[in-house]
C-alpha cells in the first residue's frame, strides 16, 4: 500500500514526507513528556 504511494510521488516528495514524519514523531514525543 505504502509502496504504491511512494511510486506515485517523486524523490523530492519522499524526502519532504520523511521530514513531516520526523516532525510528527517529535510532536508525539513532546506530548508524551
Image (spheres, rainbow, N blue to C red):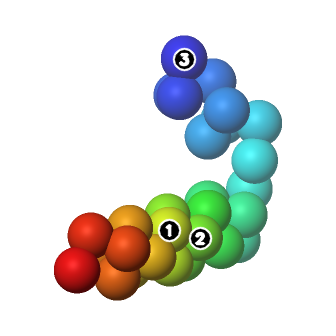
Q: Say which element carries label 1.
A: helix
Can residue 21 be spotted in the picture?
Answer: yes
Q: Using a 10 Å C-alpha cutoff, classify the residue at mark 1 as few (fewer than 14 neighbours), some (14 to 19) or many (20 or more).
A: few
Image quadrant in which the N terminus is located: top right
Residues at marks 3 and 1, CA–CA distance in whole angstroms: 21 Å
**Of discs 2 and 3, which sits in the foreground?**
2
Where is residue 15 shown, x and y percent of the image?
58, 71
Where is residue 16 shown, x and y percent of the image?
65, 73
Residue 24's disc is: 1
Q: Are the residues at dot 3 and dot 1 in contact (C-beta closer than 8 Å)?
A: no
Residue under the point 53% across and 28% down? 2
Instruction: Name the residue carrying label 3.
Output: 1
Q: Relative to the observer, which residue lies in front, 8 or 32?
A: 32
Residue 20's disc is: 2
Q: Using a 10 Å C-alpha cutoff, classify the residue at mark 3 as few (fewer than 14 neighbours), some (14 to 19) or many (20 or more).
A: few
Residue under the point 45% across and 76% down? 27
Q: Say which element carries label 3.
A: loop
* Mark 3 / mark 1, whichever is N-terminal: 3
Residue under the point 22% across and 80% down? 33
Amino acid at each position: 500500500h505504502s509502496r504504491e504511494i511512494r511510486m506515485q510521488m517523486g524523490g523530492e516528495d519522499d524526502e519532504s514526507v520523511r521530514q513531516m514524519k520526523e516532525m510528527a514523531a517529535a510532536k508525539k514525543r513532546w506530548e508524551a513528556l
